[in-house]
Amino acid sequence: MNSTIKDMIERRSIRKFKPDAVPKEIIDEIIKAGLYAASGRNKQGAIIIAVTDKKLRDKLMVMNREIGGWGEDFDPFYGAPVVLVVLGDKSVPTYIYDGSLVMGNLMLAAHSLGVGSCWIHRAKQEFESEEGKAILKELGIEGDFEGIGHCVIGYPDEEKAVIPRSENRVFYK
């Protein structure tokens, strides 16, 4: 089996991370893989916000937790030190699909480099809020973007087994 397919089969969502920082070079390599995801008509309308600043990471975490309705003791980012926020340019008709492909590439690239990842939802609601719009403005991001997801990354503090796939999901004729 080639290494790409092996990574696809073995990658698992991590929900417990070590606090160790991920080196910028590794983050950059993961992001590069995300930016090379396929996109409709090659519009490349998805953007990534690489959040390594703990203050902003924690602000997003609180926003996400409040949207999810969890208590103050819950971290919906599972302790991951890095959050890669993927947003799609709403002027591109395929922005949701394109952003989803970016998310997939980010997670596979992270796994291939020994970094754990998990797709965390509620980015749409976060960046539709006034607080989220203010974050985009502060970062100099202009345009009409929708949050697709958060790809949280860090070093796993748990092991995950490969779970067999469900039967009867492929049909040939």
Image (cartoon, grey):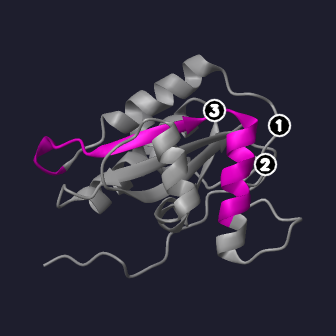
In this view, the mark in front (2 or 3): 2
Q: Is residue 162 depicted above or below 24 in this figure? A: below
Quarter of the image with the N terminus is: top left
Q: Nearer the viewer, mark 1 or mark 3?
A: 1
Residue at numbered disc 3: 114
> Which is nearer the eye, 111 or 4?
111
Q: CB atoms at circles 1 and 3 under 8 Å apart?
A: no
Q: Quadrant of the C terminus?
A: bottom left
Q: Is mark 2 on a helix, strand or loop?
A: loop
Which residue was labeled with disc 2?
A: 79
Q: Which amino acid does label 2 sit on?
A: Gly
Q: Give the range drawn in magenta.
A: 40-64
Q: Residue 19 carries which label?
A: 1
Confirm or deny contact between disc 1 and disc 2 (CB under 8 A).
yes
What is the x, y in percent for residue 102?
A: 37, 46
Residue 144 spot, x, y in % from top left: 31, 55
Distance in Å between CA atoms under marks 2 and 3: 17 Å
**Residue under the point 50% across and 24% down:** 28
Separation of marks 1 and 2 at Cα, in angstroms? 7 Å
What separation in Å lies between label 1 and label 3 (alpha carbons)?
15 Å
Q: Earlier in the sequence, mark 1 or mark 3?
A: 1
Q: Quadrant of residue 161?
A: bottom right
Within 10 Å of disc 2 (Cα), the crowding (few <14, some 14-19, many 20+) is many
Q: Nearer the viewer, residue 144 or 153?
A: 144
The answer to which of marks 2 and 3 sits earlier in the sequence is 2
Task: Give coordinates of residue 135: x percent, y percent.
Answer: 54, 46
